[in-house]
Amino acid sequence: MDIKFIPTPQKRQKPNFNKLGFGQYFSDYMFEMNFLPGQGWVNPEHKAYGPISIEPSSMVIHYGQTVFEGLKAYMTPKKEILLFRPQRNIKRLNRSSARICIPEVDEALALKAIIEHVKLNRDWVPDVDGASLYLRPIIFSTEESLGVAPSDSYKFMVISSPVGAYYAEGFNPVKIYIEDEYVRAVRGGIGEAKTAANYAASIKAQQIAKEKGFSQVLWLDGVEQKYIEEVGTMNVFFKINDEVITPQINGSILQGVTRDSVITLLKDFGYKVSERKVSLMEVLAAMNDGSLLEAFGTGTAAVISPIGEIYYNGKTLRMNNGKVGPLAQKLYDTLTGIQTGRLEDKHGWTVKVE
Ligand code: COI
């Protein structure tokens, strides 16, 4: 299917690429395609970024039937642009959609739309260390109806934002608050889907943690509140002695692309990686006896986010003297090295935009 191109009458003003923050600025072009009753996905087009019009009765506003993705385009030293494992994000988009009854998009068309989107916005890919163009594909229901049911129409869009570090700390250890009141997901729920409700569910705990001086929340399982699931909006890893442990996929944990890449790199480095249940008690005991050597979050936005302190039950536990651990550093350097074309891509993860 060909994608229509409508040139923008006016380019947007570019921000200072050295002071981007996260998700504050948006590039010139966006992609849009509609799912219509009896027609399926039709009318794909690239056009100027700008407001869209939807009815107040659009189902997404009421019942949140919407999914999203996050992936990045990087500028290499040779001024080529690379995407990191975009096919995996597209597959996950369709899996998230399937969970909440949104019709799948054609994977090849979605990849073409993403690549063309980056090409059209190529001067928005920052040529600055630690920065990239963050791509945000979204699908949402548009039927005008108040009945709780799958919508008969949807919109698929791709927007993009030049970004720097996700956390104000940058690549520095963050302080974590263990959340044992609120949960983000439960067994049989939608935790594994990248859908808005999971993020809405996390905001309150995140706000409380912030007010108490912490950057992120460590999420426990929604059934027993005993096992660790995620940290902030990321997957989480613990290095206890020589074993690197990450919670196993269980339906409520997001199947992170960075998580999968980190597991592969750890195996390349020769580590024993265990995807298994890991209880809060196991982690606290390992902190107390000094066998917890490092902990870090992984995600597209932050890449690797080292954990420096964990607060629980009135006690603050520090690890690695609150400094970036050697493993987190090595993973960050290797992953960003591959993403930006500075290191060999042995696993064929990057896709050149040309
Ligand atoms: C990502 O790491 O891409 C995420 O999904 C986090 C996002 C909610 C900012």
Image (cartoon, rainbow, N blue to C red):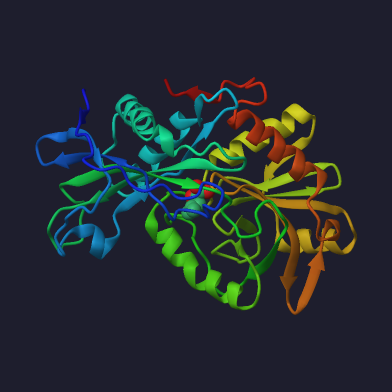
Relative horizontal placement of residue 267, taking residue 159 as reference (left or right): right
- Picture quarter with the C terminus: top left
- Estimate the x, y position of residue 332 in percent, counting from the top left: 69, 40
- Estimate the x, y position of residue 71 in percent, counting from the top left: 47, 40
For image coordinates 42% across by 65% down, the residue present is 200
Q: Single out the residue that lies furthest toward the right.
A: 289
For image coordinates 58% across by 61% down, the residue present is 221
Q: Nearer the viewer, residue 238 or 189?
A: 238
- Estimate the x, y position of residue 96 in percent, counting from the top left: 38, 45
Q: Nearer the viewer, residue 79 or 118?
A: 79
- Estimate the x, y position of residue 277 in percent, counting from the top left: 67, 51
Q: Is residue 296 visible?
A: yes
Relative horizontal placement of residue 9, taking residue 334 as reference (left or right): left
For image coordinates 41% across by 52% down, the residue present is 25
Q: Is residue 251 visible?
A: no
For image coordinates 56% across by 76% down, the residue present is 208
Q: Nearer the viewer, residue 161 or 62?
A: 161
- Picture quarter with the N terminus: top left
Q: Nearer the viewer, residue 143 or 220?
A: 143
